[in-house]
Image (cartoon, grey):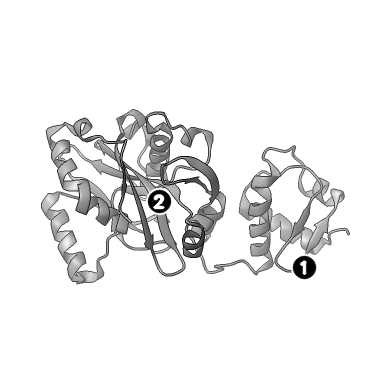
Amino acid sequence: MSATPHLLNKFTTAAAIANTPIPRLAFSLVSSSPKFHLFSSAFASRLLPHPPTLSSSLIFPRVLSTFNFAMGDAPDAGMDAVQRRLMFDDECILVDENDRVVGHDTKYNCHLWEKIESGNMLHRAFSVFLFNSKYELLLQQRSATKVTFPLVWTNTCCSHPLYRETELIEENALGVRNAAQRKLLDELGIPAEDVPVDQFIPLGRMLYKEPSDGKWGEHELDYLLFIVRDVTVNPNPDEVADVKYVNRDQLKELLRKADAGEEGLKLSPWFRLVVDNFLFGWWDHVEKETVKEAVDMETIHKLT
């Protein structure tokens, strides 16, 4: 049947929210409500004037989600708009426990605790530990709008390589290092020239699983990247609430406050795992400028 102007406007809104190239073809979209069934080549020609740029298998789920959102029945309607975009647009890399790529899925699905528990969904991640020339560690407090672990303090930057060519490169963890450079700019405004890709040192990998609030959680195979650089920091308030450099003693005081529940201070679970298992020994190597001696990329430390 032909799409009404009202539905065309709704779908145009959904396509704009998705901010995704869509193929020029006739197609069918079925939302969670059966009353919305669109199948019209005229509709496609009007709405989609450009030739295909992505396969329908990547596009349809995303467009359907944003279409439902435009119709007003999307899940998590109260989610911050920036976080919603990242949750549905970003495709994480799914791996097995040996870090072999087995597929990809949205950031949204990868962080749903129900899916993590029922399907053991595991995705690749990274954690950056950036030290300045005084060997102080840069920490960030995650923004209040973050879906998982809002307002907790954590290491410099924690995120995911995406399912894209430049971030899937496995040799010398180049894909992960490319992703780290991208996210340091996105989250902390650190220019790429301040953090050259070849200056990141992958020290190790760990696997962990941790719930956030009952609905959300993390199940990650996390690459631990160290870098020593003096950088310009301009935090993105959509991602970061606060930043600070700490020396060893200041970090230990932060740990004490978190353990005592003082000032409502909380640390991310992945940061705490690194602190408890690796950080201070690796910090010794940072200060001695012998970080490469600590590298162990053969072992995957299972800390779940």
Determine which residue is flagged by label 1: 34
Q: Nearer the viewer, residue 8 or 92?
A: 92
Res 243 seen here: no
Q: Nearer the viewer, residue 278 or 266?
A: 278
How busy is the neighbourhood of tag 1: few (under 14 within 10 Å), some, or many (20 plus)? few
Q: Residue at x 15, y 37 (%)?
A: 285
How busy is the neighbourhood of tag 2: few (under 14 within 10 Å), some, or many (20 plus)? many
User: Which of the marked residues, 1 or 2, is nearer the chain's N terminus?
Assistant: 1
* Circle 2: residue type: Glu
Q: Residue at x 48, y 35 (%)?
A: 168
Tell me the tag on residue 220.
2
Q: Position of residue 259 (x, y in %)?
A: 19, 66
Q: Position of residue 224 (x, y in %)?
A: 31, 43
Mark toward the viewer: 1 or 2 = 2
* Circle 1: residue type: Pro
Q: Position of residue 109 (x, y in %)?
A: 53, 57
Residue 251: quarter of image: bottom left
Q: Quadrant of the C terminus?
A: bottom left
Residue 281: quarter of image: top left
Residue 84, compared with residue 178, is above or below; it is below
Q: Residue at x 74, y 39 (%)?
A: 50
SS of the residue at dot 1? loop
Residue 137, compared with residue 193, is above or below; it is below
